[in-house]
Image (spheres, rainbow, N blue to C red):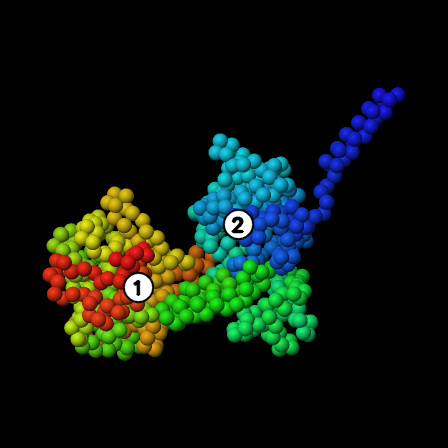
Amino acid sequence: MKKKKIIRKNTLEIFKNTIKVLEPPPNLKLSEWADENRRLSAEASAEQGRWNTDRAPYQREIMDSISDDRYQNIVVKSSSQVGKTEIVLNTIGYIVDHEPSPMLVVQPTETAAEDFSKDRLANMIRDTPCIRDKIKPSKSRDSENTILKKKFPGGILSIVGANSPVGLSAKPIRVVLFDEVDRYPASAGVDGDPVDLGEKRTNTFWNRKIIKVSTPTIKGISRIDQEYEASSKGVWNLRCPCCGRYNPLEFRRLRFEDANMQCMHCDEYFSESEWKEQDGKWIHEFNDNKIRGFHLNELASPWKSWSEIIASFKKAMKKKKETGSIEQLKAFINTSLGEVWEDRADGDQVEDEELLKRREYYSSDLKDGAILITAGVDVQDDRFEIEVVAWGRGYESWGVQYKKIKGDLDKDEVWKELEEYLDTEFFFEDGRSLLIAATCIDTGGHFTDKAYAFIKRMERKHKRIYGIKGQGGIGIPLVYKQTTNTKTGVRIFMLGVDQGKELIMARLKTKEVGPGYCHFPKNIERGYDEVYMKGINSEQRLIRFVKGRPKLEWVKKSGTRNEPLDLRNYATAAVDIINPNWDSLEVKVLKGINYMKSQPKSKRSRPSGVVSRGVEV
């Protein structure tokens, strides 16, 4: 009898366990899962330990929309410093643990995909107990679990680059997370738009999820901005401590002196802490829209103070005023405010005639204010084209000479003539003089080997004559990276020529003499004629459609030559490469000791006070 009771009891336990396994999981929201299970890693977070959605309450509705069956498409247009990558990681953890299914994460490049997996995902898996045992560690011999592929019970996670057509067109998936979509290429190889390719992989799932997250870029080409505009357009709002009405967090309503924000309803000002002690909620302009859209800026972030944001803006404006560069301001608009940059380059250019009228007579090679000279060299089939440019405080510039050296570039004597010209001594009116501190020479075209050999000889003579290659594309800095030609050992600098052109155009539009202003000589022998002025102003930025997607490109105006623009780009890059110590140079130039005329020509050195890769030489 006792034996039968034991058997009956065991059978009941087995039945209960079976029911428990077969029953559907509890209806758990993503934010609830994160609060209960997620652990923040020390390597990737300043606040390691248990996840707490209340720390950044704006994240709750975003995450819960992802786990809400009413919505298939979620769009997050966001600044930096608001935890958007953590939302992506929470989504991955939730799917692995709570809704096992095939999942795809798309990063801008394959390199970015590997970095995301190794630096962020691996740490989350390691430190979050409920998914740790479900995903095996990456092993090179285990085809089921690698850096870019993670298999778990009931599903698989694939991580790919948007430039990988193979990764985007494989097996069906239910959940696809597009991270930083504004950094995607226009096409994944020859297969087309990477977002379209990824979305097509979800077509067989009734409960599919498509999540797009990104910092925006330029108006008209920003993918995340276009997606947001087609969504419910949610904005995070905080309740006013005085009148109780809700306000979006807007930078324009900040008072800079005390970092207080004005209420748009009652006009009262309150501090950051007073605002953030109040209730917050998302207000959607089109609440019935099934595409759930969210816009966030750094003002909502608990990790960046309003005073720090104001300081970043002031720094960007100071940079623009001192150098004419808008890159830092553009980055602020995109990464701090989470807004698109409105680019006015399409037609908003200085006129050729205006540049011609700007020219002035030079009574000597160099004008007062010049501190440093650089040069750019373009290698053509039958000539060198060279521009020598003098620079002063705030990147005020003076065109010194535009020159052509014609000849057979297969012959060494022509390259010798170029070397001798780049050793030219340029004089101020009072007798002081400067040498060219650095030169950038293009190594493309039909004389690459000759250019490499020339640069190698100049390196042996300790002359700062650098080989360069141009690389187009949005977001690539002017001095992008340094590589070494494996055959010759020559150092080559990769230049982000699009950013250089944008910088030059901004400086050409500077109308007040001072930082960023471009001076040109009227003296005929200097070479700054109508052809030059048309050449430096020969390109404009236009939006073109490539494979159906908008792309911002520099387009040459009909009937013009763009060598002057290229050469000014190279001369500008030379300044950035040597990273001059302006204070030191200015003192030496004013004292007339930057170049010692009494030295024999063979012993003349480049101006001191120049910094190359952070070391004064």
Which of the 4 image quadrants contains residue 129? top right
| Circle 1 residue | 581
Taking the image as shown, residue 611 lies to the left or right of residue 289, namely left
Q: Residues within 10 Å of mark 2 (few under 14, many from 20)?
A: some
The tag earlier along the polypeptide, 1 or 2, is: 2
| Circle 2 residue | 44
Q: Give the answer, above or below, for where 177 lies relative to 562.
A: above
Which of the 4 image quadrants contains residue 497? bottom left
Q: Residues within 10 Å of mark 1 (few under 14, many from 20)?
A: some
Instruction: Name the amino acid, label 2.
Output: Ala
Q: Secondary structure at mark 2?
A: loop
Taking the image as shown, residue 604 lies to the left or right of residue 158, namely left
For the point 30% across and 67% down, the residue is 583
* Res 199 seen here: no
Instruction: Name the amino acid, label 1.
Output: Asn
Q: Give the answer, above or below, for where 293 lies relative to 132.
A: below
In the image, residue 413 lies at what x, y percent? 12, 54
In the image, residue 156 lies at what x, y percent? 58, 39
Q: Secondary structure at mark 1?
A: loop
Q: CA distance from mark 1 to mark 2?
A: 35 Å
Q: Give the answer, above or below, for where 537 lies relative to 461.
A: below
For the point 56% across and 35% down, the residue is 136
Query: Outermost residue toward the right?
Result: 1
In the image, residue 203 lies at what x, y percent? 59, 46
For the point 50% across and 46% down, the residue is 119
In the image, residue 380 lies at what x, y percent? 22, 57
For the point 41% across and 58% down, the residue is 474
